[in-house]
Image (cartoon, grey):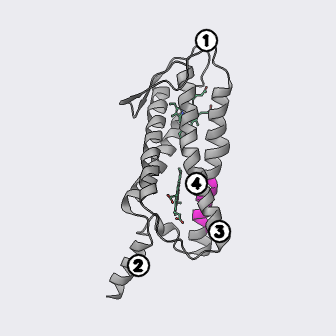
């Protein structure tokens, strides 16, 4: 009886299964996207879209689609009530999550604009053709690439590091239930 009550309580403090699935799928795809981005050849004036670059465009635009779905799901499904944390920590967490969502949209958008500027077609997950985001000029200005790289490292990666550090802080130092909101089995 006690065990059932505890498991119900834990479940009601956790994100719903769809939100959890979307969270961990995003983590997997973002990790793959960084790996491909760092492995593929640098882009020069006459670079052709090789296999790794094609995978990067397909996966990155797929991530964008997934994030749009995730934000739509989130807007209709409230997260569980906040854990008992000091008010400033709840504000910092909410701010970081909002910034993560914004970066998860803007990073692929800057990449998509770079690909369109080079005249490369973009298909989400290699299947769904997307229109060119910008026209293809004779000489692609460097700021397309610079904007994407800025978002990739200085914004998205920084937020991810802060976010993971916070999750580990809750788990290993405060030893509270924050991580089990996304990983209820833990
Ligand atoms: C969250 C999603 C994404 C992540 C994490 C990501 C990550 C990266 C990384 C790590 C690089 C290598 C940067 C370097 O040279 O150090 C890169 C470059 C690039 N990405 Fe992405 N990317 C994402 C989405 C996209 C999307 C959606 C597209 C296009 C549809 C795209 C197009 C490009 C292009 C064209 C480059 C090469 C820029 C250049 O070297 O001129 N990226 N990206
Ligand atoms: C690519 C890496 C990651 C991204 C982009 C990401 C993104 C997000 C976002 C946007 C939320 C807010 C969910 C919402 O309220 O709608 C969230 C929540 C959460 N994430 Fe991540 N996450 C990443 C990796 C991780 C990792 C590696 C862990 C665990 C070590 C983790 C643990 C959590 C937890 C516990 C929550 C719930 C926090 C709470 O409600 O108090 N995340 N994540």
The residue at label 4 has a CB less than 8 Å from ligand 2: no
Residues at marks 2 and 3, CA–CA distance in whole angstroms = 23 Å
Mark 4 and mark 2 lie on one chain; the one further toward the N terminus is 2
Query: The residue tagged with tag 3: helix, strand or loop?
Result: helix
Decide whether the magenta segment is chiefly helix, strand or loop. Answer: helix
Residue 69 can be seen, yes or no: yes
Q: Which residue is mark 3?
A: 89
The quarter of the displayed image where residue 118 is located: top right
In this picture, residue 90 sits left or right of residue 50:
right
Query: The residue tagged with tag 1: helix, strand or loop?
Result: loop
In this picture, residue 31 sits left or right of residue 123:
right
Residue 40 can be seen, yes or no: no
Highlighted magenta segment, given as a residue range: 160-169
Mark on residue 138?
Answer: 1
Q: Which residue is mark 4?
A: 98
Residues at marks 3 and 1, CA–CA distance in whole angstroms = 49 Å
| Residue 68 pos. (x, y %) | 45, 45
Sort mark 1 into few (<14), some (14-19) or many (20+) by Cα contacts within 10 Å.
Answer: few
Residues at marks 1 and 4, CA–CA distance in whole angstroms = 37 Å
């Amino acid at each position: 009886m006690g065990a059932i009550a505890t498991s119900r309580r834990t479940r009601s403090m956790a994100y719903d299964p769809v939100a959890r699935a979307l969270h961990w799928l995003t983590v997997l795809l973002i990790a793959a996207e960084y790996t491909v981005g760092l492995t593929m050849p640098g882009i020069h004036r006459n670079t052709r879209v090789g296999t790794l670059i094609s995978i990067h465009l397909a996966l990155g635009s797929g991530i964008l689609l997934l994030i749009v779905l995730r934000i739509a799901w989130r807007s209709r499904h409230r997260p569980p009530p906040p854990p008992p944390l000091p008010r400033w920590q709840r504000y910092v967490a909410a701010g970081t999550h909002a910034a993560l969502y914004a970066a998860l949209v803007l990073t692929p958008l800057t990449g998509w604009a770079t690909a369109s500027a080079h005249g490369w077609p973009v298909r989400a997950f290699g299947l769904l053709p997307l229109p060119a985001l910008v026209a293809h000029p004779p000489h692609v200005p460097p700021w397309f690439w610079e904007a994407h790289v800025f978002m990739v490292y200085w914004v998205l990666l920084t937020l991810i590091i802060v976010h993971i550090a916070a999750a580990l802080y809750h788990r290993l130092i405060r030893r509270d239930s924050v991580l089990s909101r996304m990983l209820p089995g833990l």
